[in-house]
Amino acid sequence: MTDLFDSFHRRIDYIRISVTDRCNLRCAYCTAESMPRLPHDEILSYEEIRRVVQAAVGLGVGRIRLTGGEPLVRPDLSTLVELLTQIEGIDDIALTTNAILLGRYAAELKAVGLKRVNISLDTFKADKFKQITGSDKLENVLNGIETAMQVGLNPLKINTVVLKGFNDDELVDFARMSVDEGWHVRFIEHMPLVTTGAPNTQLVAVEDMMAIIQRSLGELKPSLPTSGNGPAKYYQLSGAKGTIGFIGPVTDCFCSECNRFRLTADGRMRPCLLEDSEIDLKGALRMGASSQELRELMQQAAALKKDRHHLGEEFVPNKRQMWQIGG
Ligand code: SAM
């Protein structure tokens, strides 16, 4: 087996797969005014996704994350999870979700082999939740978190995008959950993708997030990652079972450690979230490509991977927004 490397000697062993471009929320920083939807027949079937993953295993890919849009709005997601867990060589399947539907599906997903979930939650306040997501279903999210913990989807991580003047006053409340409830909370810098080219006035830098938390809750001690080998830097508060991670795509470019590809719902392999180049796998799949041919296309995608993103500089990606890629 040949492992998959890009031109900068980074090994790709992880694919984030967007299973749909539909979402049941309208988060202000993620969605656009106009959101044209893919026709259903443009979206990869579960069998097509299985074929891509099966081929990728032959290049040393062993970890998969399902995302969206909102992955739980796609019918029978557990069927896909089951198909993927049966592939020898895949040893970690995770899900990123807004948890609106997680209470309903957590047990079923766990039963077919889902290992863990990341849940996106930016506020504990119902009025702000409505303001940022357009939905009044905060209770569903909190129930989803509870249910996921009960059924053993571990470690469960909460992802919070921090927005200046919107939820930076809740940083301490979220951080405290790592002590009170053993949550693994990760704070993410806002990436200016929707407001293409405009100054990122909503940015709270990781350094400032850490200062706010330490002022109220004491020292953040460096800690080991809870799972995976993603871009977060982890810390713990004294007496906490949970961890606090910080992801700084804007102020702390972590591209040199990038280990991933992204597969869009319409079957494009994207070497970088923040760069527009893509390789069409769907066309090849539907023309009857073999696993070896799919692997060759993935190698072409690896060759397109740039050394680093240029967010906030001369170039911003504009072909797809976050809801179309999966974060
Ligand atoms: N619907 C699922 C969810 O909410 O987790 C999966 C897709 S969503 C695009 C994945 C993640 O991207 C979410 O945690 C979301 O907060 C994050 N995200 C979207 N737009 C972002 C932005 N402009 N900057 C930082 N994170 C963003």
Image (tube, helix red, strand yellow):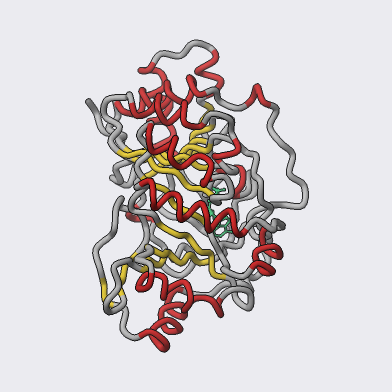
Residue 150 horizontal side relative to residue 284, left or right: left
In what quadrant of the picture does the N terminus appear? top left
Residue projecting furthest to the right: 34
Q: Position of residue 277 (x, y in %)?
A: 53, 40
Q: Could one spot residue 79 in this view of the protein?
A: yes
Question: In the figure, residue 70 lies in which quadrant?
Answer: top right
Question: Where does residue 262 sit, x and y in percent of width and height?
Answer: 47, 40
Of 118 and 137, the residue lying toward us: 137
Query: In the rendered image of this protein, does residue 15 appear above or below residue 317?
Result: above
How many marks do you count on the picture?
A: 0
| Residue lying at the far top of the rendered structure | 288
Residue located 58% across and 53% down the image: 140
Residue at 55 percent of width and 25 percent of height: 44
Residue 295 % position (x, y): 37, 24
Q: Is residue 196 visible?
A: no
Q: Tell me: 10 left or right of 319.
A: left
Residue displayed at 42% across by 21% down: 51
Return the residue nearer the eye: 154 or 70. Answer: 154
Which residue is nearer to you in this view: 15 or 12?
15
Q: Ligand 1: which quarter? A: bottom right
Residue ID at (63%, 45%): 320
Q: Residue furthest bottom?
A: 215
Q: Give percent across and percent down for residue 93.
A: 36, 38
255, above or below 248, in the image: above
Q: Is residue 10 left or right of residue 158?
A: left
Q: Is residue 209 above or below residue 185?
A: below
